[in-house]
């Protein structure tokens, strides 16, 4: 049976991206998106619900994101869901396995923002014309060994 694993996300970055490199020299950046949604509060009003999603980008995409994107910017991306399993409270009576779902970024698009330049001296790219495809970015496979990630 065929399988399909793709997510499309748009939200605001919760912090400035920090570019890091693996011991083998691969660029990697982790970003967290805050995705806001208005939902009825049951009393005729609305409340704001926020979902936070962690996304990892690799190589050239990571370098571009670190250079041009900053906290608060609107950010659009596609990616693949990925799960990891870790042991919490190892060796204690309440030891348990915990799954964490993250996204491995595949492509992204720089969105228009109020600021035209940032504190790092970079210039933000203008938004592409409506209907144009998102910029192509490479999607290298994530490392086989998670110990290669420097954080």
Image (cartoon, rainbow, N blue to C red):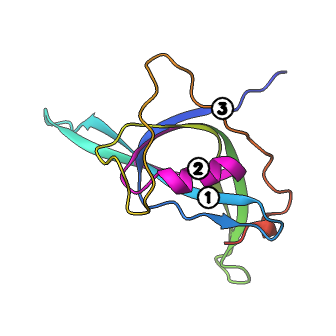
4 lies left or right of 33? right
Which mark is drawn over residue 29?
1
Viewer-side residue, 107 vs 40: 107
* Contact check, label 2 and label 1, Cβ < 8 Å: no
Q: Is residue 16 magenta?
A: no
Viewer-side residue, 9 vs 41: 9
Crowdedness of circle 2 by 10 Å Cα count: few (<14), some, many (20+)?
some
Which mark is drawn over residue 64?
2
Crowdedness of circle 1 by 10 Å Cα count: few (<14), some, many (20+)?
many
Q: In this view, does 28 lie above or below 95?
A: above
Residue 66: x and y in percent read 55, 57
Viewer-side residue, 95 vs 71: 71
Q: Which element carries disc 1, helix, strand or loop? A: strand
Residue 53: x and y in percent read 51, 50
Label 1 vs 3, first from the N-terminus:
1
* Contact check, label 3 and label 2, Cβ < 8 Å: no
Residue 56 seen in the figure: no
Observer-side mark, 2 or 1, equals: 2
Q: Distance between the residues labelled 2 and 1?
A: 10 Å
Q: Distance between the residues labelled 3 and 2?
A: 12 Å
Q: Is residue 68 above or below residue 110?
A: below
Q: Which element carries disc 2, helix, strand or loop? A: helix
Q: In this view, does 122 lie above or below 38?
A: below
53 lies left or right of 14? right
Which mark is drawn over residue 136?
3
């Amino acid at each position: 049976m065929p399988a399909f694993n793709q997510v499309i996300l748009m939200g605001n970055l919760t912090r400035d991206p920090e570019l890091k490199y693996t011991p083998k020299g691969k660029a990697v950046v982790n970003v967290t998106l805050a995705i806001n949604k208005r939902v009825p509060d049951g009393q005729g009003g609305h409340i704001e619900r926020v979902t936070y999603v962690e996304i990892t980008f690799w190589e050239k995409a990571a370098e571009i994101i670190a250079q041009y994107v900053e906290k608060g910017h609107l950010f659009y991306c596609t990616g693949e869901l990925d799960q990891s399993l870790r042991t919490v409270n190892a060796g204690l009576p309440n030891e348990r396995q915990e799954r964490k779902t993250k996204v491995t970024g595949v492509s992204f698009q720089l969105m228009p923002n109020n600021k035209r330049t940032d504190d790092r001296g970079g210039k933000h790219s203008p938004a592409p014309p409506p209907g144009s495809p998102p910029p192509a970015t490479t999607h290298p496979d994530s490392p086989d060994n998670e110990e290669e990630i420097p954080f």
